[in-house]
Amino acid sequence: MFLHDFAHVYATDESENWTPSGYRVETLLISFIGLMILICTAAYLDPMAIKAVGTATVAMSPVWIPLFLATVFWTTWIEYLRFQYLFRRKMVLLEVQLPPEVIKSPLAMELFLTALWNNGSETSFIQRIWKGQFRVIWTLEIASNEGKVSFYIHLPKDWRNIVEARLYGQFPEAKVTEAEDYTTKVHFNKEEYTWWGTEYKKSKAGAVPIKTYVDYALDKNPDTPEIQVDPLTNILEYMSSIGQGEYVWLQFIIKARKADEWYGFYKSKDSYKEGGKKEIADMMAAAGERAKKLVGDDPEKQAQAQARGLTLLTEVERRKVEAIERAMSKLLFECGIRSMYIVKKERFQLVNIGSLVRLFDPFRSGEYFNNINVTRGMSIFDYPWQDFMNIRRNKIMDQIMFYYRERAYFYVPYDQSPEFFNVEELASLWHFPNSLVNPPGLERVASKRAEAPSNLPTGPAAPPLNLPS
């Protein structure tokens, strides 16, 4: 777990800013070196200070040791219960074959995802701390196996009927079938295949959204799809372009979010909404400062201008405020995004890795909205000092393949820090494109299934005929 969770060079955006020229020096290593330098300096300048700290630590041990042990016990207990609950649930993989005609906007997928948002598995505090139950984990997937692109949903088996009914409610012409796990059909080995995988994160914290289908106006003009631009087209075209012996997989592992949580206890704060409110407050303050500079040095005029400046947001800032407020009003999922490129060694193409790195560029919108960038995984290795003799690379290579196959992201033994995506953002990233978007590898239902005739009799059944024997 250490290699996967911490073997990356920019755990936060700030680490890129203070490392020299962005040379990707390991932040954990720099922190350790800095701590050692601090201790050695203190020991040289004031040896008694080091001795005093050690004495105080020992003297306070009756206080901090029980607290430390209690924390370790509680976290281990909850992880153990969740581990048991996780592996007791039977899972199933459903393949969704797209309808021949999709005339609905991604709003239909947003309504479907809204139906998935639930807390049916943790209805009480006792269930969380005694049974280890947690909210249902779903996985939305798009997989290209040698150019054949398919949509999948990985879910608990006891939810299958409900999910199918809700999906058919929005897309009655779709075809949903239980599928064999495509990740196990090919026996990948390092002698014949090589693979590259990465995970993704948002560039900004809080409720700053990515560019969604609403910003592309896909919720408008549903009768004229020929004038619409669907950002998902880029991803589907890329996945259709790969050839024989190549595989590109993409998964969104999601879980309904309630609030910040610590091992069974929900906190009163919500870092998602707090981040969004802070972003709005910063824009308001910047508008006020701009207004103050226009009136000179008179304090009274500056105060008046600053008060008026709160209404002097630029057009882009207004759009951003509206997007943040809309994002905070929607249901929220905790989400992990992971992609894989697997290929036979003789067919390896570096350009396909570059395409995965920039996979979500259509959902970027400059500095004013959020972006989705690569983080953990194989994308962290740019310089030779990051990986001696490919030790970390080979370890992460095995782990990320295992994590993808297990759809592993939340809770032990995989526990990762999730990103926050509301239902509008998720529906933008995973939805069924309209019929004009037709990459060669995208499978749809072969023909439109006929509806039942409208004039079928609905009255009581006719009495049986008394035929002569």
Image (cartoon, rainbow, N blue to C red):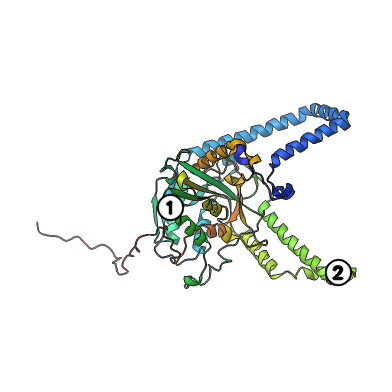
Residue that mark 1 sits on: 243
Q: Hey, which residue is sitting farthest left in the picture?
A: 469
Tell which tag, 1 or 2, sits nearer the viewer: 1
Q: Is mark 1 on a helix, strand or loop?
A: loop
> Crowdedness of circle 1 by 10 Å Cα count: few (<14), some, many (20+)?
some
Marking on residue 302: 2
Residue type at mark 1 is: Gly
Please, what is the three-letter code of the amino acid marked with disc 2? Gln
Q: Which residue lies furthest to the right in this view?
A: 298
Query: Is label 2 in a helix, a strand or a loop?
Result: helix
Is 175 drawn above or below residue 68 in the view shown? below
Where the C terminus falls, by quadrant?
bottom left
Classify 422 as above or below 104: above
Contact check, label 1 and label 2, Cβ < 8 Å: no
Number of residues whose C-alpha sits closer than 10 Å to that of mark 2, classed few (under 14), some (14–19) or many (20 or more): many
Task: Pinpoint residue 393: horizontal percent, then vertical percent.
Answer: 57, 39
Q: Nearer the viewer, residue 124 or 312?
A: 312
Can you give x and y, in whole percent of width and height, for residue 384 in the image? Answer: 64, 41
The residue shown at (54%, 54%) is: 355
Indicate left or right for 368 with 158 as reference. right
Q: Can residue 49 be seen in this view?
A: no
Inter-mark Cα distance, 1 to 2: 64 Å
